[in-house]
Image (cartoon, coloured by chain):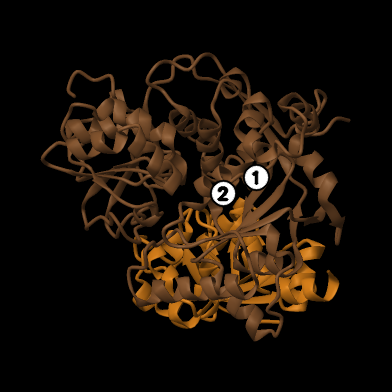
């Protein structure tokens, strides 16, 4: 019997099976941020075992509230900073070099096909775009990961989702994943890995694949995952060129992490996107999706472009192309947060930041802030936000606020029109 | 092991997410105790008032996909600091379930029809839950009736509960 990508990665990393169907995996990397790691660090200190399993396999960033907004967030940063220094963790990204973990760590070349990765952050599934098994976990799993370099998982069933057809102009990876979640529901993939494949995925950039995998957890999945291919190798080449003689050699090596033709799946879903339209959400769950063309006139108070879902350079290019030469509607405020300093610099050099600023956007430093209602764009009671983020839970961006999830193109068009609008509308 | 017995809090909705269990704005805290006053503060549910209805409760009984959304272990901690160490639901989000067992707490799955029965029999009046962890049996009593259910927890998660959580277990074994 053949194997899925996740099964191959489990086989290569299992160090113990403590019970039927349970696998303790060796971890290639543990990612850490300032919201979920400090309490793990404090607990390790309390237990008298303030150690790290491998300082080079732990990558640390301050990203959720950056720079600190008050004394409490400053203390979280301080605990993380002191811990990273104490253990000589080289890859620690402090204010100034920091960006959103799920954009920064791939950009730094920390993810490889076949890796096992955990982080105390549910959107860790993003890194599956590289053919890795990457799972969000809690603080206790993070703590054990830091100390022992292991994590326990039950046997993962895999759902294969083949994205077929050809993506229409103006429709993006964000619309694809919203349509998938709308189709299978917020618990459609609980305790499963989603393997995304098919011609549309093959044609996607790494940025688009990260957008796709990022929201796998919104369908309950443990990890999204895409088979590594030439696109993966091309993205990683600057980081792996000393490891392989040529990109072709790397591709051959990474083929090991492609699924077998006779792999067995929990379910195979063929999801055609040939007629897909730009989508948005209309409730408090990410599976409550609706084509933008079918929305009633929906004014919003804020537009937010950024986050680990859609704050990468490709997203900013798409949004800037819509915004160029236009002005933010006077009834709303618009915010763009480049996800990393690298994205920010690139956007500056391409003139994208000027386009946003000329239009009246507020450009913030890289941070998660607004997405979870922490800082840099919190909503007031009764306000609505058109947002490129990943969660529309009640109160997510601020108590009493409504979040409409959408692509960067739709968010940009909405910023111009003042009401939820797709980029092909005559009204912008 | 922690206390797994006491009065039930019924939350009659599926997909209660971790933002509703403990809003993100409290993730800036670095002690579990600081979360205690804010459990279910953002949960909008007809007839539920967090200020009145949480005190004295020891077990949550709810519907499918409890704890979906964020990976924050602050959700189980907010329950724990309120004396609630057991959640009984039709199903759980993966990370939330593992966070419960990792902290030596219980996430118990019961089939939908048994959850329906619990809501029908006890949903509107006080009910006491008695958990026999070793035997895998639950007894729920109140309003002059009593129901018993069997439940299953995998061997690994049982060991975590007995060890007092994943850190103690892993430190001994790996």
Task: Tell me the quarter of the picture where residue A197 sits.
Answer: top right
Residue in the image at 64% along x and 31% along y: A232
Depth order, front residue of A80/A417:
A80
Q: Which mark is residue A111?
A: 1
Depth order, front residue of A201/A206:
A206
At which x and y percent is residue A163? 58, 22
Q: Which mark is residue B11?
A: none
Look at chain A in the picture and name its colour: brown
Q: Is residue B151 visible?
A: yes
Residue in the image at 83% along x and 69% along y: B174
Q: Which mark is residue A105?
A: 2
At which x and y percent is residue A272? 54, 18
The reply to whether callout 2 and callout 1 are in contact (CB within 8 Å) is yes
Residue in the image at 57% along x and 44% along y: A106
Q: Which element type, helix, strand or loop, lies under badge 1?
A: loop
**Where is the N terminus of chain B found, in terms of image quarters?**
bottom right
Q: Chain of mark 2?
A: A
Residue in the image at 22% along x and 42% along y: A361
Task: Tell me the quarter of the picture where residue A38 sits.
Answer: bottom right
Q: Is A396 positioned to the left or the right of B123 in the image?
A: left
At which x and y percent is residue A187? 56, 44
* Separation of residues labelled 2 and 1 (CA atoms): 7 Å
Look at chain B in the picture and name its colour: orange
């Amino acid at each position: 019997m053949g194997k899925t990508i996740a099964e191959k990665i489990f086989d290569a990393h299992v160090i113990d099976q403590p019970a039927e169907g349970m696998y303790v995996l060796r971890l290639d990397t543990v990612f850490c941020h300032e919201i979920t790691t400090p309490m793990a660090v404090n607990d390790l200190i309390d237990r008298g075992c303030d150690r790290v399993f491998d300082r080079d396999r732990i990558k640390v960033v301050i990203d959720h509230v950056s720079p600190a907004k008050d004394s409490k967030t400053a203390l979280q940063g301080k605990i993380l900073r002191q811990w990273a220094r104490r253990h000589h963790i080289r890859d620690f990204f402090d204010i100034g070099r920091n960006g959103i973990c799920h954009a920064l760590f791939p950009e730094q070349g920390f993810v490889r096909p076949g890796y096992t990765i955990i982080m105390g952050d549910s959107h860790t599934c993003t890194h599956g775009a590289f053919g890795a098994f990457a799972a969000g976990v809690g603080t206790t799993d993070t703590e054990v990961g830091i100390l022992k370099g292991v994590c326990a998982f039950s046997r993962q069933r895999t759902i294969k989702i083949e994205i077929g057809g050809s993506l229409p102009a103006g429709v993006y990876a964000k619309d694809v994943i919203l349509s998938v979640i709308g189709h299978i529901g917020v618990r459609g993939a609980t305790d499963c890995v989603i393997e995304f494949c098919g011609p549309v995925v093959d044609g996607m950039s790494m940025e688009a694949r990260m957008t796709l995998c990022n929201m796998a957890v919104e369908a309950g999945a443990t990890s999204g995952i895409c088979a590594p291919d030439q696109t993966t190798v091309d993205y990683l080449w600057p980081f792996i060129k000393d490891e392989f003689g040529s990109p072709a050699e790397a591709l051959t090596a990474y083929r090991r992490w492609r699924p077998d033709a006779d792999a067995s799946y929990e379910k195979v879903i063929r999801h055609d996107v040939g007629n897909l339209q730009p989508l948005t959400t209309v409730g408090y769950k990410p599976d409550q999706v609706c084509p933008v063309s079918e929305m009633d006139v929906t004014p919003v108070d804020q537009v937010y472009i950024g986050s680990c879902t859609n704050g990468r350079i490709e997203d900013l290019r798409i949004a800037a192309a819509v915004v160029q030469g236009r002005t933010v509607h006077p009834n709303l405020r618009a915010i763009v947060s480049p996800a990393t300093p690298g994205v920010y610099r690139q956007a500056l050099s391409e003139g994208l930041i000027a386009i946003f600023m000329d239009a009246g956007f507020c450009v913030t430093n890289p941070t998660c802030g607004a997405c979870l209602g922490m800082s840099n764009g919190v909503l007031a009671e009764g306000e609505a936000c058109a947002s490129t983020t990943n969660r529309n839970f009640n109160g997510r961006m601020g108590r009493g606020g409504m979040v409409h999830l959408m692509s960067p193109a739709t968010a940009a068009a909405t910023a111009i029109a003042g009401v939820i609008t797709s980029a092909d509308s005559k009204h912008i | 092991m922690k206390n797994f017995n006491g009065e039930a809090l019924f939350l009659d909705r599926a997909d209660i997410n971790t933002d509703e269990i403990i809003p993100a704005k409290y993730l800036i805290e670095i002690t579990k105790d600081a979360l205690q006053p804010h459990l279910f503060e953002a949960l909008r549910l007809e007839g539920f008032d967090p200020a009145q209805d949480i005190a004295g409760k020891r077990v949550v009984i709810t519907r499918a996909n409890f704890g979906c959304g964020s990976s924050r272990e602050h959700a189980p901690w907010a329950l724990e600091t309120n004396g609630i160490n057991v959640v009984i639901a039709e199903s759980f989000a993966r990370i939330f379930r593992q966070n419960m067992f990792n902290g030596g707490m219980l996430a118990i799955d019961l089939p939908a029809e048994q959850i329906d029965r619990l809501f029908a029999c006890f949903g509107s009046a006080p009910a006491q839950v008695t958990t026999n962890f070793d035997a895998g049996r639950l007894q729920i009593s109140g309003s002059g009736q009593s129901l018993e259910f069997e439940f299953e927890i995998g061997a690994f998660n049982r060991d975590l509960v007995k060890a007092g959580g994943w850190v103690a277990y892993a430190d001994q074994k790996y």
